[in-house]
Amino acid sequence: MRKSTVISIAGAMLFTIIFYCQKDGVNYLVFTVFVSAATLAINPMLYKKMLWWLVTLSAIVSGVAMAYYGNNLAWLANVAALLLLVGISASPVSSGFIAFFHALVSMLLTVVSLAKNLFSKTEEQKVFRLKQAVLYVLPLLATLVFFGLYRMANPLFAEITNKITINFPSMGQVLFTGVGFYLLYGWFHPFLFQYILKTDAGALNYLPSISEEEHRQTLWSEFVSLEAERKSALILFALLNLLLLSVNLIDVYYGFIAKVLPTGLTLSAYLHDGTNALIVSIVMAVAMVLIVFRGYLNFDDKADSIKWLVYIWIAQNVITIITTLNRNLLYINEYGLTHRRIGVFVFLVLCIGGLLLTFLKVNSKLSNWFLLRSNWWMVYGFLIAGAWINWDVIIFKHNMNLAALQHTEPDDYFLISLSHTATPAMLEMYAAQQKSGHGIFTKRMEHDLHYRIEQSRERVEYDDWPSQLLMHHIIVKKAEQLNLITTVP
């Protein structure tokens, strides 16, 4: 039996032990460590690959975040990191998004991998496998036979063994183990598309130099002359710059100078409609840059003016992003912080990163493939880092402080919908209110807080180790320190 198959079977058993009828917690960290060790055991040469170690580290970091917070973002980061780890392990020289794609496909096409392993062997290999199976099965059968004989021969042995109860796995456990095996077998027997791997390996970050004569011999130049292409690109980015300049002047005036919106325009429409349009405009404009600077214009001495127009356009887009950040900030200062509004901030920061990478692509004559690779790693890095930020605490504190500043009652329906990760901040604010005798904690929030404390204590006392979350231990300990519950024995 192949090493990868044995590891898949062992992993399926571990998968059932730590996940079956368990809650999210330490089990994700244990599973991540297992997958990391298993991929290295299957392919020991991975220890020489720096990228593999970096991805493994990011996967374990996301696993720790899952064991600490256990929230949706940590879960998403951990799943993405595991898929990337498996993909990089299968093809260490692949781009990040290609490795991720192959891990996902391998998981979905496990049936194909199983069939390939079972039916693609020669007759000699099948006979050898059968002999191996017999060698494993015979000792087990012999042991069972002698177990029965010893029970008949020794009444004391029979009496003691009668007291041993064997808990046979339920159908649910068997099916769950099957799911674990299906998942791991697909990962450890990767399904790789060779054409994609070759295309990825052959796609360099730097564009190969091309002469004007070579460009004129291409199929594209038969339809569009080089002179027409230059003029078209020049007009395109000149018009885009003029249009974007007018948009930015209006935004800067109303957002930073007048600081008041025109009559009939609400702050909500100003933010949401503007953000949606910004998404579309940046994606379309970057696509235009990729099309224009796909080949010879990168090396054309007469295209410098076009490049400068692109640089100005990128700078103007950064200004547009800054004005949109200001809109989002105004909206948050008026109506409070939510996950969606945090998402707007994250998206806009990623847009700035994407624009800077676009500038680097044009300025350094880099390929479109470079842009895809670098943007992938940027988004992945943000996901792993974001999983370690307690966003719910930030939301709770901001909204409570805003309500106190505005002398209004907080939106308690929204605040009690926050995850358990906000509970430590709730405890601190509630204890401060109890001590000072005044505050803005509502009765609904107070009732919810005591319910949260009780939930955390129950999880600490009664949950099995795979379901334990460090955050619940922190909540219980803090509640004990603030004398909101008695010490857990």
Image (cartoon, helix red, strand yellow):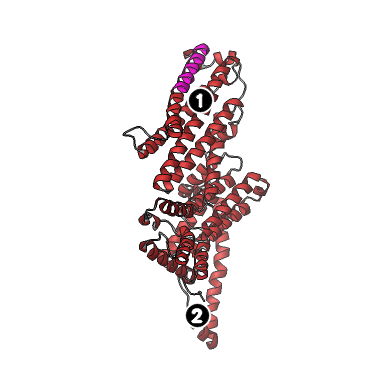
Give residue 9's position: percent from left, percent from top: 53, 59
Outermost residue toward the bottom?
A: 155
> Which segment is the magenta one?
225-242
Instruction: Depth check: give the residue in front, 321 or 71.
Output: 321
Q: Residue at x 41, y 48 (%)?
A: 336
What amino acid does circle 2 point to? Ile
The quarter of the picture where residue 253 lies is: top left
Outermost residue toward the left?
A: 264
Q: Residue at x 53, y 74 (%)?
A: 144
Mark 2 nearby-residue class (10 Å; few <14, some 14–19, many ≥20):
few
Tag count in the figure?
A: 2
For marks 1 and 2 on the same chain, the one whose residue lies earlier in the sequence: 2
Magenta stretch, overall SS: helix
Q: Quadrant of the N terminus?
A: bottom right
Q: Which residue is mark 2?
A: 164
Can residue 191 be seen here? The reply is no
- The relative height of residue 346 versus residue 401 in the rendered view (above or below) is above
Mark 1 nearby-residue class (10 Å; few <14, some 14–19, many ≥20):
many
Q: In the image, which is nearer the foreground, mark 1 or mark 2?
A: 1
Label 1: which secondary element: helix
Instruction: Depth check: give the residue in front, 474 or 252.
Output: 252
Residue 46: in magenta span: no
The answer to whether marks 1 and 2 mark residues whose Cβ atoms lie closer than 8 Å is: no
Give residue 222's position: percent from left, percent from top: 49, 13
Outermost residue toward the right?
A: 48
Give residue 481's position: percent from left, percent from top: 52, 69
Instruction: Depth check: give the residue in front, 138 or 287.
Output: 287
Label 2: which secondary element: loop
Residue 233: in magenta span: yes
The quarter of the picture where residue 206 lies is: top right
Residue 313: give its label.
Answer: 1
Can residue 19 be seen here? The reply is yes
